[in-house]
Amino acid sequence: MKKIFKKLFSVDRIELISKHFNLEDSSILEIGVHRGDFSKELFEYFNPKKLVLVDPWITFDDPEYNHSFYGNISKDGQSIQDQYYQEVVNRFSNETQKHKIEIFRDTSDNFFKANDTKFNLIYIDGNHLCDFVKKDILNSLKFLKKNGVIVLDDYRLTGWWRDGVTEAVDYFIKNKKVNFLAKHDIFNYHHQCILSKI
């Protein structure tokens, strides 16, 4: 049944975001870059004035992360992350030279501590454990421009992170810090949610 709904009602995430965000000369922040595939989509579709990419590209030995992109179960996880980082650097070398894209190899916490830029769109796809997602949302709210939007990946989806993304988002909804502009359901199948600041 789930596969049927996914096939019938699947929505592309760029298409979804574009219904709520279409600002020219915008500033976009992406937390959690991995290999830069979605970064490329964001850049090419929205043509922002500046796209900032933040990812530590590090592995964790904690068994909790074994089935994540950054688990170190094979013991060569860090060399893989180093390779991914270099791929992203090479992929966007022209854009970084033109100062259209900035790449920060650090945790989102450390990025926000040093940041003084406000963003029109913040896409959160970093560490999916609830406490980390809460921190990313809280920090993002501090650096969101008026009428800006926050988008989270893997909303209402469980995995190695259990339901950390959903739990964190629902916490901010319950405490009236954000509103839903859009969210995943069986008739809008995308596992994204788009938030605005209250």
Image (cartoon, rainbow, N blue to C red):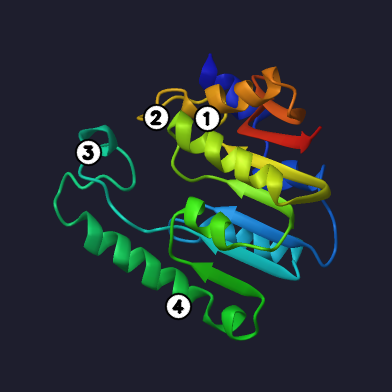
- In this rendering, the answer to whether 10 lies above or below 58 is above
User: What residue is shown with label 3?
Assistant: 62
Q: Earlier in the sequence, mark 4 or mark 2?
A: 4
Structural distance between the alpha carbons of marks 1 and 4: 30 Å
Q: Are marks 2 and 3 in contact (CB under 8 Å)?
A: no
Label 3 amino acid? Asp
Closest to the camera, between mark 1 and mark 4, is: 1
User: What residue is shown with label 2?
Assistant: 161
Label 1 amino acid? Val
Report the disc number at residue 90: 4
Closest to the camera, between mark 3 and mark 1, is: 3
- In percent of width and height, residue 147 lies at 85, 46
- In this rendering, the answer to whether 71 lies above or below 44 is above
Closest to the camera, between mark 3 and mark 4, is: 3
- In this rendering, the answer to whether 43 lies above or below 60 is below
Closest to the camera, between mark 4 and mark 2, is: 2
Q: Earlier in the sequence, mark 2 or mark 3?
A: 3
Q: Earlier in the sequence, mark 3 or mark 4?
A: 3
Using a 10 Å C-alpha cutoff, classify the residue at mark 3 as few (fewer than 14 neighbours), some (14 to 19) or many (20 or more): few
Structural distance between the alpha carbons of marks 3 and 4: 30 Å
Label 4 amino acid? Asn
